[in-house]
Image (cartoon, rainbow, N blue to C red):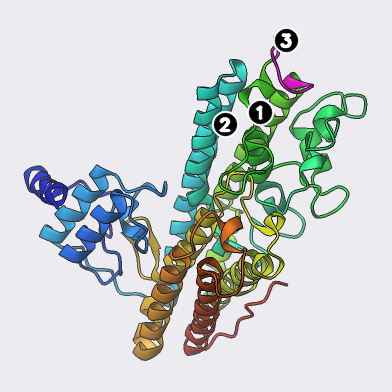
């Protein structure tokens, strides 16, 4: 508590923090247009490492952590109030979504760029500290991308059947032996096949991604994850690939270290290029890009698309593919970020992204969104949907980690009970999203096409 009051005092001394836009309101966790002391205290608990339900409006830089400057912003907002949201129309709600998505992809690109820089530094002079820095950059980069995944499932620029790069960015589960050595096969993978693949670059990774099956994945976050952590062979922790796998002066621990370094660099380079393309597809005032086409749609069609993305991520993907499959099989290979043991970050930030899209929020920025439209026509449905989001978010944050241990044991074990509760809450949330769509006179599907 002393730390909390020190932050309050610092906020009073600093005064009103500079805001990037009229609708910035740091710490407005429930998006009700005001910051309460309870919300500030919750932010302090989050900053201290509490697993309380996340407050996306505190995480202004969308990096998954709450920093002192963000807490100061919340104190200032509590003292000075939040700017009111402008009147909302269907067209303005669509524009709000497009604005926030452009910012979100920009955050994801910035994280990937920092990851690329860390990887380049590491492979130039491999050390244990350099490997840890690259791992930290990977973990830090994940939240921003995951919060964009509600923009999938409606043939947008991320997953258009012909041009969408989603399969190159976040495809999983990954067959490790397609890329590099695994236990029992030291010669496995592209890296250890110089005769077949003399040059490792982005063109090769693009050509080989899912070339043989859905699990022969050669690029994206999870390929990088495997190259940084290696196989997860520890029940209590993540993979433990040694930095010496990249040492080329004779002190290495695995064959083909230079090729491994080239692969890791190429994967990071391709990730940055793919995220740049998706970010640019949502860039404002750019003739001919997807954003321009999206804003030119009938607003009801645009709303149908974004609600479809939200509902399908909530139901078909997060509930079905990412939780239920692993729950049923108890197989580590079915968890999302299995090498780093960071699957809980994936689940939490997917959920935050869905809620952000409903509320019209990105970090501390809020513009009129779906919630405001639904509240105008059916306040009961709007409140029920918000309550469903709160319940699902709380349930997801209650899943113990690492996730590969939470799925084990009997159905009465704490981890499996928590996952079952999250699945039930997500099903309720998915139904609530469909109810919100219906309140607007829009019909959506929440199953994966």
User: Which mark identifies residue 116?
Assistant: 2
User: Alpha-carbon distance for marks 2 and 1?
Assistant: 7 Å
| Callout 1 secondary element | helix
| Callout 3 secondary element | loop
Query: Which one is earlier in the sequence, the residue at label 2 or at label 3?
Result: 2
User: Alpha-carbon distance for marks 3 and 1?
Assistant: 21 Å
10 Å neighbourhood of mark 1: few (<14), some, or many (≥20)?
A: many
Q: Residue at x 19, y 48 (%)?
A: 72
Magenta stretch, residue numbers: 248-257
| Callout 2 secondary element | helix
Q: Is residue 321 magenta?
A: no
Name which quarter of the figure residue 296 lies in: bottom right
Quick one: 104 or 62, which is closer to the camera?
62
Q: Which residue is mark 3?
A: 250
Query: Which one is earlier in the sequence, the residue at label 3 or at label 1?
Result: 3
Q: Residue at x 53, y 79 (%)?
A: 424
User: Which mark identifies residue 265?
Assistant: 1
Location of residue 126 with respect to 376 vertically, above or below: above
C-beta proximity under 8 Å, tags 2 and 3: no
Quick one: 389 or 18, which is closer to the camera?
389
C-beta proximity under 8 Å, tags 2 and 1: yes
């Amino acid at each position: 508590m002393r730390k909390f009051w020190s932050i309050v005092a610092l906020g009073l001394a600093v005064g009103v923090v500079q805001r990037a836009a009229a609708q910035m309101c740091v710490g407005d966790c429930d998006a009700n247009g005001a910051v309460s002391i309870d919300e500030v205290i919750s932010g302090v608990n989050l900053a201290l490492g509490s697993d309380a339900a996340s407050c996306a409006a505190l995480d202004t830089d969308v990096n998954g952590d709450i920093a002192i400057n963000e807490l100061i912003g919340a104190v200032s907002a509590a003292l000075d109030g939040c700017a009111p949201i402008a009147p909302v129309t269907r067209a303005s709600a669509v524009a709000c979504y497009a604005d926030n998505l452009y910012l979100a992809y920009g955050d994801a690109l910035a994280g990937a760029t920092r990851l690329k820089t860390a990887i380049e530094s590491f492979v130039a002079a491999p050390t244990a500290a350099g490997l840890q820095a690259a791992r930290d950059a990977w973990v830090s980069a994940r939240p921003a991308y995951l919060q964009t995944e509600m923009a999938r499932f409606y043939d947008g620029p991320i997953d258009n059947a012909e041009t969408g790069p989603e399969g190159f960015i976040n495809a999983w589960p990954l067959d490790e032996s397609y890329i590099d050595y695994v236990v029992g096969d030291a010669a496995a993978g592209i890296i250890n096949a110089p005769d077949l693949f003399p040059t490792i670059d982005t063109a090769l990774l693009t050509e080989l991604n899912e070339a043989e099956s859905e699990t022969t994945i050669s690029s994206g976050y999870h390929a990088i994850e495997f190259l940084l952590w290696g196989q997860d062979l520890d029940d209590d922790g993540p993979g433990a690939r040694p930095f010496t796998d990249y040492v080329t002066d004779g002190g290495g621990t695995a064959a083909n270290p230079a090729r491994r370094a080239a692969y890791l660099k190429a994967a990071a380079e391709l990730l940055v290029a793919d995220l740049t393309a998706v970010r640019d597809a949502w860039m404002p005032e750019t003739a001919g890009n997807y954003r321009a086409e999206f804003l030119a749609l009938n607003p009801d069609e645009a709303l149908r698309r974004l609600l479809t993305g939200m509902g399908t991520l909530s139901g078909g993907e997060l509930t079905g593919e990412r939780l239920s499959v692993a729950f049923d099989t108890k197989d580590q290979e079915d968890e999302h970020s299995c090498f780093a043991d960071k699957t809980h970050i994936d689940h939490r930030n997917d959920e935050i992204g869905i809620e952000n899209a409903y509320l019209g929020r990105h970090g501390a920025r809020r513009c009129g969104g779906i919630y405001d439209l639904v509240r105008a026509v059916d306040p009961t449905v709007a409140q029920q949907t918000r309550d469903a989001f709160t319940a699902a978010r709380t349930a997801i944050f209650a899943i113990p980690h690492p996730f590969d241990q939470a799925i084990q044991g009997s159905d009465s074990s704490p981890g499996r009970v928590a996952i079952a509760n999250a699945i039930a809450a997500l099903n309720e949330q998915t139904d609530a999203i469909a109810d919100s769509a219906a309140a607007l006179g829009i019909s959506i599907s929440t199953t994966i096409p």
